[in-house]
Image (cartoon, rainbow, N blue to C red):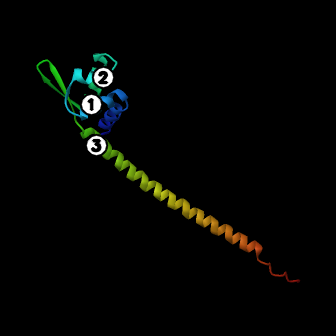
Amino acid sequence: MPSMDLDDTLVALADETRRRILNRLAAGDARVTEVAAPFGISLNSVSKHIRILERAGLVRRRIAGRDHFLSLDPEPLDAAARWMLRERQAWTHRLDKLEAALRAEDAIEAARASARTKSSQSPKPPRRKP
């Protein structure tokens, strides 16, 4: 997924109004006026949100006469989910390697500390007189 497409998708999803529009469209196609009805904002404001969703490729518009029908296109969501999964796997792998390295370092330090403790507790051989 190109980064601009991902950016557009994440920007579109960042707003609660746009997420609610997507939830409505997940139930099926709807006219713009039907989508706008539950919101306490102007039709013009809802239209701006819809344009952002269209730019991200999340919403498709079909015009039939004077009616504008909207439908959900889940592909950008799927692409974003795939990207997140890849990133999660990569970071999990990196963090697992870091954890293993830190545990190994802790084990080495513990062994050194144990050796120092044992050497300081063992009796020292008597010094020879010249």
Can the viewer see residue 87 in this picture?
yes
Report whether 64 appears left or right of 104: left
* Foreground of the two, 29 or 121: 29
Contact between labelled residues 1 and 3, with CB atoms less than 8 Å apart:
no
Report whether 81 appears left or right of 106: left
Contact between labelled residues 2 and 1, with CB atoms less than 8 Å apart:
yes
Q: Amino acid at mark 2?
A: Pro
User: What secondary structure is marked by label 1?
Assistant: helix
| Rendering quarter of residue 61 | top left
Image point (29%, 33%), residue name: 23
Q: Position of residue 6 (x, y in %)?
A: 32, 38
What is the quadrant of the N terminus in the image? top left
User: What secondary structure is marked by label 2?
Assistant: loop
Mark closer to the observer (2, 3): 2
Q: Amino acid at mark 3?
A: Ala
- In the picture, the disc for residue 79 is 3
Q: Amino acid at mark 1?
A: Arg
At label 1, counting other C-alpha atoms closer than 10 Å, the crowd grade (few under 14, some 14-19, many 20 or more) is some
- In the picture, the disc for residue 24 is 1
Image point (63%, 66%), residue name: 110
Q: Which mark sits nearer the N-terminus, 2 or 3?
A: 2
Q: Measure the alpha-carbon separation of dots 1 and 2.
A: 10 Å
- In the picture, the disc for residue 38 is 2
Q: Position of residue 93 (x, y in %)?
A: 42, 56
Can the viewer see residue 57 in this picture?
no
Report whether 28 appears left or right of 42: left
* Foreground of the two, 127 or 110: 110
